[in-house]
Each structure stands twice: as C-alpha cells, then as structure tokens.
Amino acid sequence: MLQFGLIENNLTAAPNDLVAQTVNVRTLGVDDIYKRILKRNPGLGLSQLQASTEEVFEEICTAVEQGFGVNTPLINIQLSIAGVFHGANDNFDPKRHQVKTNISAGVRMRKATASIKTQKVLAHEPVPHISEVHDVLSDTVNELLTPGGVIQIWGGRLKLVLENPENGIFLTGEQGETVKLNVVVENKPARLIAMIPADLQSGTYALEVRSTHGSSKESKAIKTGKFNKELTAVND
C-alpha cells in the first residue's frame, strides 16, 4: 500500500491545486530482498542466492562497461553521451563529455507499478530524510559508529538551523539515553558531516535529524527524520 498526502502545489497559480506526496515509504536494500525471498522459499540457501544475484549484477555491469544496452523485465538500460562536440573532427574528452546511464522501467516493473494500491492519509510538512549513514573511520555504511570518528549522513532536507539548540543530530541508545552530536562540520540539505563523541558508549543506537529549516515562519516546528536502521558503537 502506497500512502500519500496532498500538499500545496507551488508550480501553478490556482490556489486550490494540490500535488501528492508519498509518505511512510520504507526503502529495502538487497539484504532485505534476500530475507523476503527466504521467508517465502525457506528451502533456498542464502549463500547460493547471494552468489546467483551477484553473477547477474556483475554480468549486467560488465555488459554496460563494454558499451551494451541491457533490457531486463525489471529495468532497461541505455547509454548516451552528454556534452558539445566542436566540429566533425572533435573526439570524446572526459573533461567536456560524459557517458550517461538512462534507466527506465521494464515490462514486469511497469506491471508491478500499475498494480500498486494507494491510500490517502493526512499530509505532513516534509521532514528530513536519511538515506545513508557512512562511518568514515571504519569505512562502513549503515552499520557502525566509531567513537571519536566522523559520520556522513546522506539524504534530503537535512540542513540544520545550528543557532537553535533543538536542531541537531541525535543518537538514542537502548535505554533511551540521548546523545547529541555537537560538532557539525558540514551542514547542507543533502549531506551532514559531524564528529561522533569520543566518549560514546558501546551499544546500539537509533539516529535522527531534528530541524526547523524550511518550517513556516509561524510554526518553526521541529521536523524529525529517523533512520530506519540501527547503528552499533564499540568503545574499547
């Protein structure tokens, strides 16, 4: 079920025009897909499933590297080149030209999309969205927090109003304790970079971004975006 709310349409002049905004959409990774397959087919082996999938991924990437387009039931991949060529004798220059990957839905994906059931819900003001958390010292994604290290948070609507103490990056531990990451090195809508406190205790943490950036002047309401995976800290 795809949930959506209706929000103001800023692209038209009509005061009653609204557009749909999807809400509560959880993104699944490859491991999540494996779990769903194994739940439906418990006789399959995880290692065999992983190996077979990796073969498909690898062969598709190899074909694209060799300049092939690829059509599958899920996605269609076609290649194009962007940039201006100066005369018939000009050649490809990586500084001026770029190979683009154009991806469109395949037959089965279009069929699945057409079958989606929708549900209208109450619309909320857009909140920060966290898509990926990179722990720099351990070079892991969506897994670890290294005390004293650096964390990169990718997503959307992440920018903080740092003068407001209620804004920030927060970790909530297993016992409900909350730790704020006070040193924010980069503060952009699509990426935050912050220092992880050196005294962060070992344990599992939930991460969230709280921000008033973009809130209406009247409300200045805190908007909270929660990451959908837990992160683990180990402080030796």
Image (spheres, rainbow, N blue to C red):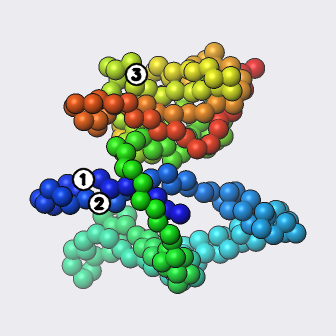
**C-alpha gap between disc 3 and disc 2:** 30 Å
Amino acid residing under circle 2: Val
- Look at discs 3 and 1 and give the one toward the viewer: 1
Q: CA distance from mark 3 to mark 1?
A: 27 Å
**Residue 3 in picture, x, y percent from top left:** 46, 58
Question: On the picture, is 97 further left or further right than 230?
Answer: left
Query: Which label is found at residue 19?
Result: 2
Residue extending furthest toward the right: 43
For label 3, the residue is: 166
Query: How far from the left and from the top, in percent, is residue 171?
Result: 57, 27
Q: Are marks 3 and 2 in contact (CB under 8 Å)?
A: no
What residue appears at the point 11 percent right and 59 percent down from the top-left corner? 13
Outermost residue to the left? 13
**Of the pair 155 and 119, the residue shown nearer to us:** 119
The answer to which of marks 3 and 2 sits earlier in the sequence is 2
* SS class, disc 1: strand
Query: Seen in the image, is 38 located left or right of residue 70?
Result: right
Q: Quadrant of residue 234?
A: top right
Residue drawn at x 29%, y 53% as measured from the top left:
7
When asked about the image quadrant of residue 16, the answer is bottom left
Is the C-beta separation of discs 1 and 2 under 8 Å?
A: yes
Residue 146 seen in render:
no
